[in-house]
Image: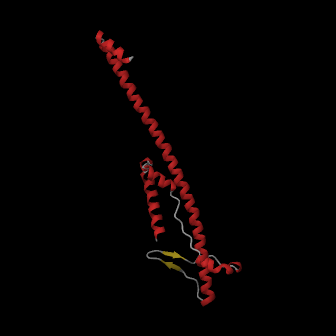
Amino acid sequence: MILRRVIAHFRKQEWTAIAIDFVIVVAGVFLGFQVTDWAAARANRAAEARYLEEIAEDLRADIETFDNILIGAKARIGSVDFLLREARGESPLGGLVFSTDTFDASGGAPVGESDRRRLLGRVNLVRTSHGNRTGFEALIASGDLKLIRERSISRDIQRYCATFEDLTAT
């Protein structure tokens, strides 16, 4: 329809009408591209929010897991302290030194009368975790890391996952 109008305007040499038709077509194409860009940006923001919420859920699960690991570690330290006191009369350890870090080992959980029957189990209990990275892995697998607008957030997430992998490897 627009093509027929333009051809008719050319035959009649109506240059103003041709210019108006040209402006209408260019404006329509421009608006079409803008609407597409706006829709894509909106979809990207929704995907970003979904990914960040999934990662936040993973982090909340990791916090709960780490809290349980800490409880187990304190029970183990408390049990070892109890055994050392009972067997050798030694006082509890003040701190454990790892390659470059020192861990305060004085916060071991006390061993009650009912815990003594499970003492060996408490000493040998070692809990580990492989973490909850399903949200981050989905983000990486999709190739959508660039959707996270705040660069510092994506770097912090990457750093957290790399540190966690390093900890589980050691």
Its colouring scheme is secondary structure
Position of residue 97 measured from the top left corner of the image (x, y, whole percent): 48, 78
Position of residue 1 measured from the top left corner of the image (x, y, whole percent): 39, 16
Given residues 42 and 94, the one toward you in this image is: 42
Query: Residue at image x 57%, y 64%?
Result: 65
Query: Residue at image x 53%, y 52%?
Result: 54
Given residues 154 and 127, the one toward you in this image is: 127
Above-or-below relation of 132 to 35: below
Above-or-below relation of 26 to 148: above
Position of residue 82 measured from the top left corner of the image (x, y, whole percent): 62, 83
Q: Is residue 72 left or right of residue 144?
A: right
Q: How many marks?
A: 0
Query: Residue at image x 43%, y 50%?
Result: 145
Given residues 27 and 115, the one toward you in this image is: 115
Q: Which residue, as the protein is rendered here, is positioned at the far bottom?
A: 88
Position of residue 115 measured from the top left corner of the image (x, y, whole percent): 68, 78
Instruction: Give the quarter of the image for residue 113.
Output: bottom right
Above-or-below relation of 48 to 39: below
Above-or-below relation of 95 to 150: below
